[in-house]
Amino acid sequence: MNKHLWLITQAQIAAGDLDSVLLPLDPEQMPDQTLLGLHGAVRLRVEAATGPADLFAQPQTRQFFRRLHARWPYAGYFLRLKPIRPTSTVDELIDLSLFVAMALCQVDKLTYTETRVGVGLEYDPAQLRQHLAELQDHAAGIGEASGLSAGIIRRREKLINNAVASFFAAGNAFHQNHKRNQKP
């Protein structure tokens, strides 16, 4: 990890190397001040990923992120997230896309298809909500341990909810706009 950029390489994914991936962000191994400074400040990047489907649609990568979450359910605390807006930067879009893609790796019976007018994605929304609630519980636990106030923890929970909702709303709006533009 270089400052606040966390890069997961294709070699780490291929080897299933969770230890080297988790080393820079193990909350048990860092002082509280460092932990506090990383709250909502880490940008995740996955080498060669060009979109969310590069994580959740590839079996090896999907399995890697399932195992990552089992050992490190703290993405909600560390990762930099903002709701998508028309003024969002490319980095903000990537940040949120990777977070949602990691969450979708945890959902069973995920169906992803490309259609003539866009992309179709089906999953169990209750299972995704359960996963996000778990992420928030772990984020709150680390937040309490590192000295975050209850208000900051609540704002983080709201931010996660709003960011994920904005991701799906933006996808739906894009899809609807694309369908309107395809009609003769």
Image: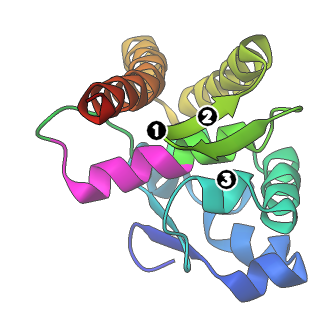
**Residue designated by label 3:** 27
- Is residue 74 visible from the viewing direction of this image? no
Relative to 149, say whether 77 is above or below: below
Crowd around label 2: few <14 · some 14–19 · many ≥20 (10 Å): few
Q: Quadrant of residue 3?
A: bottom left
- Count of numbered tags: 3
Alpha carbon separation for disc pair 3 and 2: 37 Å
Main SS of the magenta part reads helix
Of pointers 3 and 2, the one earlier in the residue sequence:
3
The dot on residue 120 is 2
For marks 2 and 1, give the one nearer the viewer. 1
Could you say where residue 26 lies in the image, as x and y percent from the top left?
70, 60
User: What type is the residue that disc 3 sits on?
Assistant: Pro
Q: Amino acid at mark 1?
A: Val
Q: Residue at x 54, y 45 (%)?
A: 99
Observer-nearest of 140 and 118? 118
Give me the disc on residue 117. Answer: 1
One can see residue 124 in this view: yes
Magenta-span inclusion, residue 31: no
Q: Amino acid at mark 2?
A: Gly
